[in-house]
Image: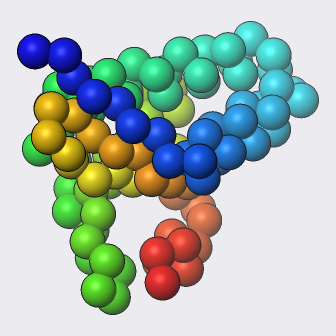
Amino acid sequence: MKVRIVQRPQFKIDVIEKAVRIKKDNPDAARRFIFAVDETLKFLAKNRKAGVTRKFGKTRIEQYPVIRPFNKYLIFFDPIENGAEFVQLLHSRQDIPSYFK
């Protein structure tokens, strides 16, 4: 069975913005960050129940950290049939509830 990985436009923007920010200090770390995000997406698409359900007002969404050493970045996603739809990528220090109003 083929797993589906769907990335919303905002998720793609988040990944690029964070990779660019990391690249300013360490280009190699930015490449490792992109790889870690990709590996985490593959894992979550196969293991849709691995996330922790978060509730922000009426919004329910799954949360899971990017694999180490980038685990301060959190992936927010919705499980879908045969995969996952990735909604947002945020740093744990960000005001997370404000993104899900």
40 over 50 or under it: above or below = above
Q: Position of residue 47 (x, y in %)?
A: 15, 32
Q: Residue at x 61, y 40 (%)?
A: 12
Closest to the observer, 39 or 68: 39
Say left or right for 73 vs 42: right
- Which quarter of the picture shows residue 22? top right
Q: Position of residue 89 (x, y in %)?
A: 53, 49
Q: Residue furthest right?
A: 24
Q: Residue at x 74, y 11 (%)?
A: 28
Q: Residue furthest bottom?
A: 57
Location of the N terminus (image quadrant):
top left
Q: Is residue 87 visible?
A: yes
Q: Is residue 75 visible?
A: no
Q: How is the image coloured?
A: rainbow
Q: Residue at x 53, y 16 (%)?
A: 35
- Which quarter of the picture shows residue 31? top right
Say left or right for 27 vs 76: right
Closest to the observer, 25 or 54: 54
User: In the rendered picture of this protein, how many numbered marks are placed on residues?
Assistant: 0
Q: Position of residue 9 (x, y in %)?
A: 59, 48
Q: Residue at x 15, y 32 (%)?
A: 82
58 over 65 or under it: above or below = below
